[in-house]
């Protein structure tokens, strides 16, 4: 391929019938110096480590509460606040990345330092609840959210023609990366009960985990770089992609977006709000398991092996099944994949409750693991759907604005669920588990209905209307500004 005078590879811009631009001609090796799969593996590794902040919380929260005499409700609101900050920071991270102010490499490295060093150090030495809120919830949420936003959105950029199972693979690391750490927590628990660590032990565990996270995320960040906007692989014809046997299946079930939507254009389509609503609802159902299965198993006296197996198996299946959903969506589409997984999770979440209440430990662990495998469907499928519907150029901020709805879902799963089960917003109380499980399952059922009936891809007419509304809004805003 010919090179420009600067030594950069040349490229061609191809425009399809809807006006979408495809930048073709540059290979990943020319742009990166190594194959594009290396970026995907780096993103996966970063996700494995940054997800520890969320997925080990259910196993550690009881030890922190016991060590410092914090009530259960404040601790579960702590989890909700973490989810709020982890969600909302993704909008800002996406905007800065889209504008070129914060390259993906630095977003990942900075996020790793914030959550691995600053957040975990403060959390480890916290003795007052407000210190834990500042450390775990605020800094932990911001740092891990920066890594998540950077890692998950890079998949669609480098694999716009076959993003399905790869998005699931990278996204899965967020959940099952915690499994070795949950097993360690169960193994070093004291005789006072599963999940109960002595104050010095829980502090040292958090510090070591923070160091591992920071170093690993730093290394992964060095390998991450975005392709140029509108980049498209040279071996796939952007106008006749159906002729390519390797990519036609995914693109036929999940056609490319009509164009690359801006954030404002995306939110002028009706699907955007429904994507956010279904996301919040199902995350409330999904994170209920993350936050409460461990504690529920302990209170039901199901035994150390069963509780640890259920919690670790939940996380392992949660992440491990996400590539499967990507593969399945190549045949039946993202929307149908989500609807089926959501519906099945409602069933198995309730079965986990019944098994636990009847002290059937093995059955509880089995249902918890299956529920975990179904719980993760919304994350990779929503991320892929946003890129399918609205294009890859602005996917970091577009998906970030949908992911921000996780803040609402996290409130459902943490504090609101605790309120429903305990009757108190703040303090210690007895947990009425049935009420909480019914609440979580109801959220999942509503999410299934929403995604199936309301989240179909935008039509070309909706695209044109969104562009016109966005342009009108821009002109209106410009009129109100003083002349420069």
Image: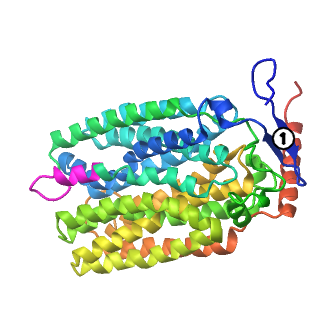
Q: Is residue 288 visible?
A: yes
Q: Which residue lies at the image location 28% right of the left edge and 69% below the top edge?
A: 431
Q: Identify the residue at the far left of this view.
A: 191
Is any part of residue 334 visible from this angle? no
* Side of 270 where 377 appears, left or right: left
Residue that lies at the very extreme toward the top in this rendered image: 5
Q: Which residue is labeled 1 in the image?
A: 477
Give the image location of residue 473, x and y in percent: 84, 47
Residue 269, quarter of picture: bottom right
Does the magenta segment cover residue 214? no
Residue 21 appears left or right of 105: right
How many discs mark residues in the rendered view? 1
Choose top left, top right, bottom left or bottom right for residue 38: top right
- Residue 402 screen position, x and y as percent: 62, 54
Q: Position of residue 32 (x, y in %)?
A: 62, 31
Span highlighted in magenta in the image: 181-195
In the picture, measured across the screen, residue 442 lies left or right of residue 79, that is right
Q: Residue at x 61, y 58 (%)?
A: 164
Circle 1 packing at 10 Å, graded few (<14), some (14-19), many (20+), is: few
Where 92 falls versus 413 (above or below)?
A: above
Q: Residue at x 51, y 63 (%)?
A: 324
Check the image and report above or below for 422 versus 272. Answer: below
Q: Secondary structure at mark 1?
A: helix
Position of residue 14 in the picture relative to residue 174 (left or right): right
**Image spot of residue 406 (x, y percent):** 53, 55
> Is 190 included in the stretch rendered in magenta?
yes
Q: Quadrant for the C terminus, please.
A: top right
């Amino acid at each position: 391929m010919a090179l420009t005078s600067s030594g950069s590879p040349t490229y061609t811009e191809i425009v399809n019938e809807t006006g979408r631009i495809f930048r073709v001609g540059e290979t990943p090796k020319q742009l990166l110096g190594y194959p594009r799969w290396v970026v995907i593996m780096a993103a996966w590794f970063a996700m494995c480590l940054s997800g520890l902040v969320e997925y080990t919380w259910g196993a550690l929260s009881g030890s922190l509460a016991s060590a410092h005499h914090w009530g259960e409700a404040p601790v579960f609101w702590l989890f909700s606040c973490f989810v709020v900050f982890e969600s909302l920071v993704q909008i800002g991270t996406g905007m800065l990345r889209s504008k070129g102010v914060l390259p993906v490499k630095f977003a990942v490295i900075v996020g790793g330092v914030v959550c691995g060093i600053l957040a975990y150090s403060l959390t480890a030495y916290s003795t007052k609840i407000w210190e834990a809120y500042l450390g775990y919830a605020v800094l932990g949420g911001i740092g891990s959210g920066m890594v998540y936003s950077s890692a998950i959105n890079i998949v669609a950029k480098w694999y716009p023609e076959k993003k399905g199972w790869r998005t699931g693979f990278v996204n899965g690391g967020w959940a099952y990366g915690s499994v070795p750490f949950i097993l360690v927590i169960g193994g070093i628990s004291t005789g006072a009960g599963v999940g109960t660590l002595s104050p010095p032990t829980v502090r040292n565990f958090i510090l070591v985990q923070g160091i591992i996270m920071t170093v690993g995320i730093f290394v992964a960040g060095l390998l991450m770089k975005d392709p140029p906007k509108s980049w498209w692989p040279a071996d796939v014809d952007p106008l006749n992609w159906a002729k390519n046997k390797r990519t036609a299946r995914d693109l036929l079930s999940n056609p490319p977006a009509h164009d690359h939507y801006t954030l404002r254009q995306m939110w002028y389509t009706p699907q955007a709000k429904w994507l956010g609503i279904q996301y919040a609802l199902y995350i409330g159902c999904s994170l209920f398991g993350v936050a409460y299965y461990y504690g529920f198993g302990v209170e039901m006296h199901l035994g150390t092996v069963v509780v640890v197996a259920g919690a670790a198996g939940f996380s392992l299946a949660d992440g491990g099944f996400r590539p499967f959903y990507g593969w399945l969506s190549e045949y039946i589409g993202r929307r149908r994949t989500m609807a089926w997984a959501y519906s099945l999770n409602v069933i198995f979440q309730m079965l986990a409750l019944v098994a636990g209440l009847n002290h059937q430990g093995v059955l509880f662990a089995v249902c918890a693991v299956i529920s975990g495998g179904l719980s993760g469907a919304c994350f990779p499928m929503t991320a892929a759907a946003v890129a399918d519907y609205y294009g890859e150029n602005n996917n970091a901020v577009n998906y970030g604005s949908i992911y921000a709805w996780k803040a609402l879902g996290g409130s459902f799963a943490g504090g609101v669920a605790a309120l429903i089960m305990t009757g108190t917003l703040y303090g210690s109380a007895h947990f009425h588990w049935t009420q909480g499980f019914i609440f979580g399952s109801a959220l999942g059922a509503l999410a299934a209905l929403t995604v199936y009936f309301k989240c179909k891809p935008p039509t070309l007419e909706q695209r044109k209307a969104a562009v016109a509304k966005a342009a009108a809004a821009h002109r209106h805003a410009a009129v109100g500004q003083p002349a420069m």
